[in-house]
Amino acid sequence: MIKQNLSQKQLQKLSPQQIQLMKLLQIPTATLEQRIKEELEANPALEESEDQENDLDNDADDLHNTDHFMESKDESASTEYEEPEYEAHKDEAIELDEYLNEYIEDDVSSYKLNISNYSADDEEKTMPMSVENSFHEHLERQLGLIRFKDEREYTIAEQIIGSIDDDGYLRREPTAIVDDLMFAQNIFSSEEEIERTLKRIQKLDPPGIGARTLQEALAIQLHRKNDNEEYAYEEKASLRLALKIIEDHFAEFSKKHYARLQRQLNINERQLKKGIEEILKLNPKPASGYSSGANSRAVHYIVPDFTITNRDGELELELNSRNAPDLRINDGYKDMLQTYTVSKQKGKKANKSQREAVMFIKQKIDSAKWFIDAIKQRQQTMYRTMYTILQLQYDYFVTGDERKLRPMILKDIADMTGLDISTVSRVANSKYVQTEFGTKRLKAFFSESLQTQDGEEVSTLEVKKILTDIIENENKRRPLSDEKLKALLQERGYNIARRTVAKYREQLGISVARLRKEL
């Protein structure tokens, strides 16, 4: 049985503009220009302004005006919204007329984004691009120096080279290469043939190429050095010792069991140190010198979103807006709406197709307004958040001393700015600030607090900095254990446990004491 029930529900929905703003807050300045280009292509009512000189001062003032910032919204609110439906022509006409009246009263041309922190006279510099051969092209050229019996052997060598990764290692098993040749090249081979061809490839430059493991890569390089007649007798002895360590005692070497190595090899500490020095001269990644080409990893350049300048003791904060071109509503769309309004005032009735065209124009203009306003609010929200961070970490931005960083979490910034924690998180994510001490990631300024023995709260970043300094200045022959590091930190007044020291050390990428040992 079908029944009808009347119920009330209280929902909080985000407007399309707020959804758009949240998405724009997440992207860094480096990708903002691409996002704006996508919107320009999708919305014909939006265009770049040709007037680059007007309203610069007004928009710069807007960044400092805290009265127009977006009000924070609960992250748990639903992000769904509904487009209005126009079922009846009468309702549609009323809404369209109200919109046209409001539109005429508003100055559409004032919807611009003219935020800029550089002069039109600034010199435009282009970065020269180097053209180099890739690592695999370098190997393929050297194949011409090897004498192969026939085209078949050459094809096998090419297949092996194509299986070598960007570090110079052959991670693929011989059986897999045999299968590749069978299915891709219609060549039947064997594992023994692959091994023979690989040995010939391993004689190519750079030394160590085509190795399957780190141990093999180091051994290949040492064999190449041992075959070189230019080395003196003492150097030859150190190279032979290094080769013996790598081939027969690699586990002890990798775990830095130096005392055990001395006993097993019957050598003194000076001889062991000479042999290890020869090993440390080797390249663990044979192809690391070839970073360009089709197989190279992409180079990412950091574009700072903010710039902090120290001018005679006073800090100035600037927002990088080079990637945000000036935007405005297309004049052609504005003229079409005005033409329709004049026709209405003269009593001319529009047919259905004309009204649909006007509704399309209205939709595109609204979308353009929303996008422009979202860009402006993005700039304002980012500036407000960074300005608050600047105030909290003022001592660091003046001195550059990481020990002066104060404990700061997202909630602290949210409380001071009146923004939601999720909004602050979006601003801090993937954003960078350029200072006179280097370009820093915003997330690097956020840290938990640690209580000292005097009851004072300090940043965990300060503790990590002191921990790094202690380890850098330790005696490398007898590195400090986590227990001793804990004792030293407690002597300086930091109330810290051994497991916390181990956690901070791992976060800093520092090895345990045994692996930090040096001769």
Image: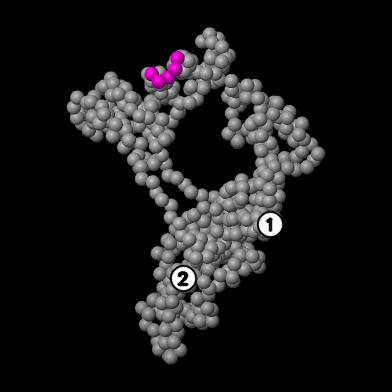
Q: Tell me where residue 335 sits by quadrant.
A: bottom left
x, y percentage for residue 297? 42, 41
> Which residue is labeled 1 in the image?
312
Assess disc 2: are there few (<14), some (14-19) or many (≥20) residues with their C-alpha within 10 Å of its C-alpha: some
Q: Residue furthest left?
A: 150
The magenta span reads 229-233
Q: Is residue 199 above or below residue 325?
A: above
Asked whether residue 244 is in view, the answer is: no
- In the rendered structure, does residue 231 fall within the stretch colored magenta? yes
Q: Nearer the viewer, residue 45 or 226?
A: 226
- Kindly identify the amino acid type of the residue bearing the numbered disc 2: Ser
Per the picture, the main secondary structure of the magenta-coloured stretch is loop
Asked whether residue 384 is in view, the answer is: yes
**Going 45% across and 28% down the picture, which residue do you hit?**
284
Q: Is residue 352 above or below residue 514?
A: below
**Going 63% across and 58% down the picture, which residue do you hit?**
317
- Kindly identify the amino acid type of the residue bearing the numbered disc 1: Asp
